[in-house]
Amino acid sequence: MAKNYVKPSMQEVFQIIDAAVKTDPSVTKGKEGVYQFNIKDEDEGTYQLIIDENGPRTVEGAEQDPYVILTLKADHFRDLVAGDLNPTAAFMGGKLKIKGNMGLALKLQTVLNSFDF
Amino acid sequence: MAHESFQTVDGEINWNAPMYRLYEKAKKNGKWNPADIDFTQDKMDFDGMTEDEKITSMPLVASFSAGEEAVTLDILPMVYAMARQGRLEDTMFLTTFMHDEAKHTEMFSRWQQQVGVGEMELSNFHSDSYKRIFYEELPGSMERLNVDDSPQAVIRAATVYNMVVEGILAESGYHSFREIFKKAGLLPGILQGIDYLNQDEGRHLQFGIYTIQRLCAGKDENLKVFHDYMDELWPDAFGVVEYLTSLYDVQMAQDWTNSSLDFDSEAMKKYAKRQFDIRKKQVDRVKNFNNAQELDEQLVKAGTV
């Protein structure tokens, strides 16, 4: 029987990430920067993952100047967070557009892998 | 501008002019056709590469594609300047130069299309240093020739175009391609194209070195213009290489990266610095000549062009 699965909203996904990154801030050390996610299509919105001296956190909207902007669909972002899609494959497959610091973008998977969502 | 006379009816082409001899070389050696390069194996190789290996090639491709397009579009003011100054042989050589650049642009675009990355947005791989050189300094110095073709303006244009873009960055780029993909036994088509490009760029470099030298012979103040501009551009030229190597280093530092490609970033940076030193030394040989005529005579005698 198929599971009665309800997709979390983008707000919920970022709340989950926020909780995860605050649980163990030490794992984001050396990955300082501002990742901005522009979510397209369904559940559109702008979110940031900020890793700075005040600790890692996520915010809704563009609170700070982003180092790198990642534009993708909500479903692809969910896959990214779930580990079903890696950012490199998403970029090469045209599912993810990147603007800004490519070095930081390359570290995104490491950041995401650091947490057990 | 109206013509007052024509060299070929008042006399003839200067068959011994260094740039005429280079024009002959270009006609003889520059016959390759990008459309004849077979990218079938490249497509198979690319499809078989991991996503991490594929992305390693993208910054290089992004740099070369835009770079070749830029030099194709930006060479025109140099052609106009040489024509305006009545330098027929230089102008004749530059017609081959323009054709070469168009083929280089075509070659990269064909490769991108054939391996399936033709529609990808790659400008995100252009760093601030890259943008300063290719988006600003190159067109700026070249377009200045439309209103100012003084020796100093020509020296600056040839410095950024021939010495920095071609002599440092393109040379370093060829080296990177070979270091990464030749060693890995991958992408034979683009490597063949790179060999052709390298051959063409050798002639372009000779044009640049000659042009700067003839304007600096016996004129230390002009030689200073060259060295000052090289020094001014170097931080960004190095910045381009540093950025590209840093992306590779960051990628390889991630424990999830699945790549068998191997590349020595430090050696690459040293290679770029060596190109910078070589270009300066090549132009500095003009100190052996008191004027442009002596330089021409020596080049003809030595048969170097």
Image (tube, coloured by chain):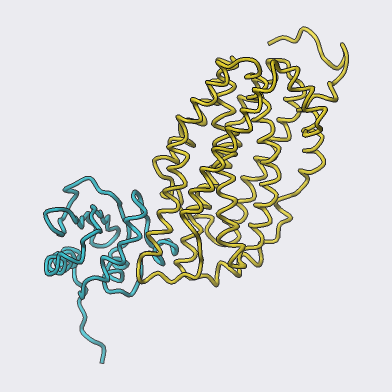
Q: Position of residue B199 (x, y in %)?
A: 71, 45
Q: In which quadrant is the C terminus of chain B drawn?
A: top right
Residue located at (65% from left, 52% from top): B194
Residue located at (50% from left, 70% from top): B260
Q: In which quadrant is the N terminus of chain B drawn?
A: top right
Q: Which residue lies furthest to the top in this view?
A: B4
Number of marks in the image?
0
Q: Where is residue B26 in the image (x, y as percent from the top left)?
A: 77, 38
Residue B100 relative to residue B270: left or right: right
Colour chain A appears in? cyan
Where residue B161 sits, quadrant-wise, is top right
Where residue B20 sits, quadrant-wise, is top right
Residue B261 relative to residue B5: left or right: left
Q: Where is residue A75 in the image (x, y as percent from the top left)?
A: 30, 68
Q: Which residue is more in the foreground, B73 or B251?
A: B251
Q: Which residue is more in the foreground, B161 or B125?
A: B161
Residue A2, compared with residue B198, is above or below; it is: below
Residue located at (69% from left, 35% from top): B97
Residue located at (68% from left, 56% from top): B192
Residue A64 relative to residue B47: left or right: left
Residue B148, compared with residue B109, is above or below; it is: above
Q: Position of residue A103 (x, y in %)?
A: 35, 55
Q: The yellow chain is which one?
A: B
